[in-house]
Amino acid sequence: MNKPYLLGIDIGTSACKVAVFNREGRVVAAASGDYPVYYPKEGWAEQDPEEWWSAVCQAIREALEKGGINPEQIAGVGIDGQSWSAIAIDKEGRVLTNTPIWMDTRAQDICDRLNENVGADVIFGTAGNSLQPSYTTAKILWYKENLPEVYKNIYKILQSNSYIAFRLTGALTQDVSQGYGLHCFDMRTGTWNEEMCDKLGIPMDFLPEIVPCDRIVGTVTAKASVECGLAEGTPVAAGGLDAACGTLGAGVIHPGETQEQGGQAGGMSICMDTYKADPRLILGFHVVPGQWLLQGGTTGGGGVMRWFEREFAAYEREMQEKTGKSSLEQLNEIGEKVAPGSDGVVFLPYMSGERSPIWNPYAKGVFYGLDFAKTKGHMLRACMEGVAFSLRHNLEIAEEAGAKVEVLRAMGGSANSMLWTQIKSDVTGKPIVVPSSDTATTLGAAILAGVGVGFYESYEEAVALTVKETRSHSPNPQNKEVYDNTYKIYLRLYESLKDLMKK
């Protein structure tokens, strides 16, 4: 095979990742590029898509160089990206303003008004999702009401992966898995609903053509080749939602199989071949044709540990050279010394409001149960347990909606923690299988390109060749009993505090 490699690009919240894979899914080379999240006001969280592109270009060049890979050896490029962007571009393809990202809740008032005037049930009936400020829909209307100069120059609204595909190929597209960000997207048919566009006030002209995630939307242009280092003419697939690509990369392609997400955000994705919607959860199309994903999406995932390490691990960072262990490895060791239940310390992981299943942009992170006997270790383990409780909460709602989960397949950086993964197994009562967690998302993106160019004959073949299980965890019944009691406190804490949080 004269083009033996696929390249996957992941547009994450804190960084992009680029990985080159061989046919068996082994990482031949990888690199990443950082970029900031801007928080100009309370409830706002935005990024500059131009900074995504710069980071992607730098990471592609670095990966190719590190792996000694000739760009001509890349058979195809796949792209995944964070959800619910609202990238406004003009007719020349210029980005008109920073995009609010999935954590942004500035448009709550617009959602309240639309839910009242159009009808929350009417919107849900078409979109299969409740209208919330973190989705793309209200962000477009926020531009109209607050940035009229931007709004009048909008040619198209793009998502994170479709923007990178546009920079690579010049093609303006909307993949089907990211359609769920707009409530004028019909979740049963995978098409734009013109009537709902009119009701919501979103011009149809703003919406790109919807394409399958494995569709080759174009090839790398001469200009993009100079900027990023890929060979001109390299095929590029539309790509899809990061959680959906990670679900594919974790080997979830059949109904009932479930991915547990441990990236910046937390949650799960349950694969289904029938339409099942619940306003407390998130419904989208899988990147695999003919399947939906019933998802739980939380703001408190691996980002909680990133925050804890940044604010409370100065000593562990200083000790890295002496111990030969990263600060996160040291924190895991500290957390292992604390008993399940953290001796009564409970953490609500609502660090940027909260998404499913409570949908409260005013929700706050809370530590409960501190006293003079408690240590950093108690707070650390409580953080891990709180994220696990949010996962359990979503799984319980999914079961109420008729989506039964037997086994979780973990992905994301959090899955590298043996302790945290075991806590999630104990809290949920579910066995957890861990594939190659760090590369699941970029692998999923690369598989889309691989199917698109014929590198793989089918998704079944791709998964069989590339997805390798590294370990598994079974729930500990004694720990589960402790966590059942702590979980009740977790739920009661939020119910007791939610009115205070809003004030």
Image (cartoon, rainbow, N blue to C red):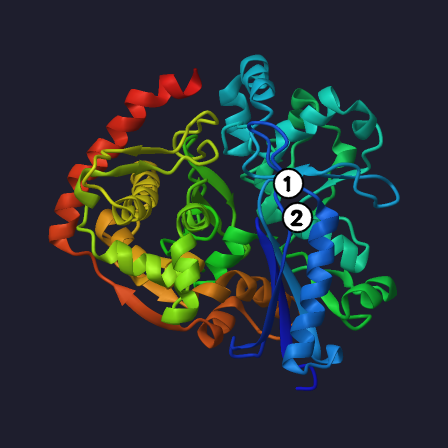
Residue 223 falls in image quadrant: bottom right
Residue 277: horizontal and vertical position, in percent?
Answer: 43, 36
Can see residue 205? yes
Residue 459: horizontal and vertical position, in percent?
Answer: 52, 67
Residue drawn where x is 22% and y is 52% of the image: 426
Mark 1: amino acid: Ser
Within-10-Å neighbours for mark 1: few <14, some 14–19, many 20+: many
Camera-nearest residue between 370 and 248? 370
Q: Which residue, given by chain and number where applicable, does mark 1 sit on?
A: 85
Camera-nearest residue between 181 and 477? 477
Relative to 159, say whether 460 is above or below.
below
Q: Is residue 296 left or right of residue 236?
A: left
Q: Which residue, given by chain and number where applicable, does mark 2 sit on?
A: 160
The C terminus, quarter of image: top left
Residue drawn where x is 32% and y is 22% of the image: 497
> Which badge, 2 or 1, comes first in the chain's sequence?
1
Relative to 200, say whether 308 is above or below.
below
Verify CB contact (< 8 Å) between mark 2 and mark 1.
yes
**Mark 2 to mark 1 CA distance (whole Å):** 6 Å
Residue 18: horizontal and vertical position, in percent?
Answer: 62, 65
The N terminus, quarter of image: bottom right
Q: Which mark is residue 94?
A: none
Q: Is residue 256 left or right of residue 491?
A: right
Residue 306: horizontal and vertical position, in percent?
Answer: 45, 50
Mark 2: amino acid: Ser
Residue farthest along the top direction in this orientation: 117
Within-10-Å neighbours for mark 2: few <14, some 14–19, many 20+: many
Q: Is residue 372 left or right of residue 152?
A: left
Camera-nearest residue between 246 and 177? 246
